[in-house]
Amino acid sequence: MVKTTPKRPPTQREIALHASVSRETVSHILGGTAAHRYNEETRRRVHEAATTLGYHPNRFARAIRRGRSGLIGIIQPSTSLELTRRALHHLAGEIAQHGYNALAASPTLHGPHTVQNLVEMRAEGALLLLPGSGPDNAYAAQLAKAGIPVVGIFGDPDPHYPGIRDGLKQGYTELTRHLLSLGHRRLILPTSLRSATPAGNRQAGFEAALHGIGPVETLEEAAFLEQWPRLARRKGVAGYKVQLASSRFASQTAAVLHDFGTRLLRCGPLPDACLCSNDQGALGLFSAAMESGLTIPKALAVTGADNDSVAALPGFAITTLDLRIEEACTLAMQRLIALIRGEALPAQEGTAPLPARLVLRRSCGQSHLSTIAT
């Protein structure tokens, strides 16, 4: 086996000899701090020599010498939702557009030391994507203690740092009212036993739409499935928040809703509509219905949230909520840049949620294929 030795990067002295200039000239031109002092021909010779010799600047070292790292950290959750991937992709572009480099960290997957790495690398700011309560608040406090400004994007808001709030409450209110307008009367909202702001917002929107129209009951999964044949015979409008026992609700929503749907479809009369927490959960119900030989929405109306790309496929055509995650990321980045510059945010900044958009498709019983209600 032939061993190869990694090629050593060229020194500034070697570049200077190749370009027939002084080492100081190379430092000024490649460092960018005083390149304007030299004519175009000298700058061209230095850059050509650097390229020929395989020189690549150490941006991190250069930034440290200037007293800033040029890094912005993204603390991301461990979920595999498309919403998270879209947010990461958009944030990377936003960060680059502002002249910074992105460094993603996932404490859940790789350990809490990843947040300390941001501190040690002198990150200039951090974005908390879909933060939860508890550990994420501790990470934010750790960054703030190091003088690193933080902005949250959706998730559980915290009074210690600004954030962009989701429009789930308003969105689920509109979604539930739309289902009622189509004649659906027995509505169920599967949710998690875990207390979290997004789940609370969905439930609050569901309850707001049914207020004064029909009762809303909260039942654990086992009790609901046991009582459903009796509950299904009730007259009038009614809503049921079903607390699913699975600990996988957040990370494997499709599998959890598939299992729940499979059991629900064996219980006799079906509810009129099921409002899932996201489009992945809606796909889980679709799968359970297909395995039982049932068609959505003929047998059961199903809705989701997040506006995943798969939800728009004609075979599913899932009615959903567009949470406008890309716009949320843009707003969060604008606020973070303001904080990095030492600018104070207005007191009311971030208090109003970013309104969700209702995307109507066939799965709710809507006759037309796809319309966005604004």
Image (cartoon, rainbow, N blue to C red):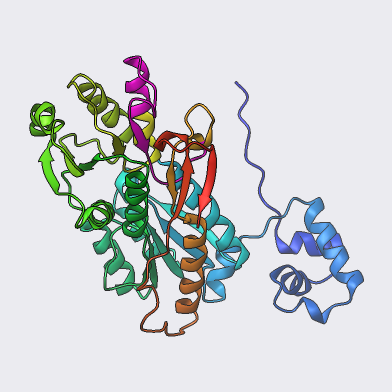
Q: x%, y% of residue 30? A: 73, 67
- Judge whether residue 289 is colored magenta: yes
Q: In the shown orientation, is residue 238 left or right of residue 79?
A: left
Residue 239: image quadrant is top left
Image quadrant containing the N terminus: top right
- Whether residue 123 is visible to the viewer of this picture, yes or no, is yes
Q: Residue at x 80, y 79 (%)?
A: 36
Residue 164: image quadrant is bottom left
Q: Residue furthest front?
A: 235
Question: Is 315 situated above or below 302?
Answer: above
- Judge whether residue 103 is colored magenta: no
Q: x%, y% of residue 217? A: 12, 45
Q: x%, y% of residue 94? A: 57, 61
- Whether residue 80 is visible to the viewer of this picture, yes or no, is no
Q: Which range of residues does the magenta coloring cover?
A: 285-309
Q: Nearer the viewer, residue 331 or 266?
A: 266
Q: x%, y% of residue 307? A: 47, 44
